Amino acid sequence: METVSRLVMYKVVIVGCGRIAGRYDKPHKISRIYSHASGYANDGRFELSGCVDKEEKVAACFAKLHTVQKSGSNIVSMLDSIKPNVVSVATPVDTHLAVVQEVLNNKNSKPDIIFLEKPVCGNRNELNELIRLSKENSVPIMVNHSRRFHPLYIALQERYAKGEFGKLIGIDSTYYGGWLNSAVHLVDILRFLFTMELHDLEVLDNLQGRTDADPTLTVRAKCGPESVPVWFRGWNEDYYQIFDLEIRFSKGRLRLSNFEQQWSWDSVVVNSRGENVLSPGVTDLPQQTDSPIINAIDLMNYYLDTRDVEVLSGKLIQDCELTMHTMWSVGSVYGG
């Protein structure tokens, strides 16, 4: 994307100073960027102007670690002082609505865009309120459903739509770390890739997640009008972390392994006995060299330069409404 040349960088305030905000990776010692702070710092078109945490000491340590200009524990005071272009919300999910309310109900200073961590909120009422706040204040809320910014998935979506892989016939995935916290990536990217909704979700197993409130579920589901079988297999991360996705098409099988760091394509071929079998094939889907959060921040920069909200299509709070409804639909586990 072409961007506008300028001398002034966009100002960023990060709310919540935990792992995804900036403690997943250390400045100047980064092989792959995962966090908000490192993503902005790496970009060069953004200025880490402020950080806020309910614990003022935590915010101060975060500011020192990431060379943030100002730290504190009061969101409104920080907004009024800095008047940021971007607010990144990286607090626990049960605080997301309250933080966004505080940001957008502030009459003295509103950001141009909010970058909200996933999962976006805890229930349907909160989601409806977040969508309302965004629309009424004309401030887009972009959600960090990071796979939507991944060039591999973007290319896969385009080429599936053209019929390159044939018909979708099955999906099998394995994840760790909680249904809402981690499996939301799988549910959301399947909706993004195939523009079909999941239905008939059935919980078959329930592992204890990182918190009792978010267990790691094994769920069987169906996708689209032809009820394509889909599996979400919960994994015990005490052994190791895993995030794998296998997509079966009529023309072959795509395997994405180890958080998309490796992928392979097997084509359907006819063997000497006339049987359809899989054989290692070649497809030029792009490899991801940078973290998707870099792509998300690049998109955010383009929006701030142009104010063309259409470039954010598919990435906003209203676009993930059906994703979250699907997540909450698994029976009594989440009150669905």
Image (spheres, rainbow, N blue to C red):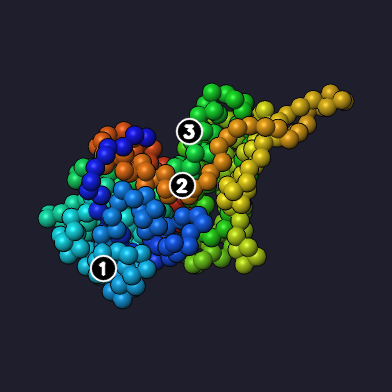
Circle 2 is placed at which residue position? 292
Tell me the amino acid under the disc marked 1.
Answer: Ser
Compared across the picture, whether 108 is left or right of 326 comes to left
Q: Residue at x 45, y 64 (%)?
A: 26
Residue 306 point in image, percent of width and height: 26, 36
Residue 124 point in image, percent of width and height: 35, 50
**In the rendered image, the vertical position of residue 314 relative to residue 238, given as above or below:** above
Q: Residue at x 49, y 67 (%)?
A: 211
Tell me the amino acid under the disc marked 3.
Answer: Thr
Out of 79 and 205, give the one closest to the viewer.
79
Circle 3 is placed at which residue position? 195
Q: Residue at x 70, y 32 (%)?
A: 281
**Label 2 element class:** helix
Q: Is residue 232 visible?
A: no
Tell me the amino acid under the disc marked 2.
Answer: Pro
**Label 1 element class:** strand
Say which label, 2 or 3, has the lower sequence index.
Answer: 3
> Where residue 71 is drawn, which disc sits there?
1
Residue 65 point in image, percent of width and height: 37, 68
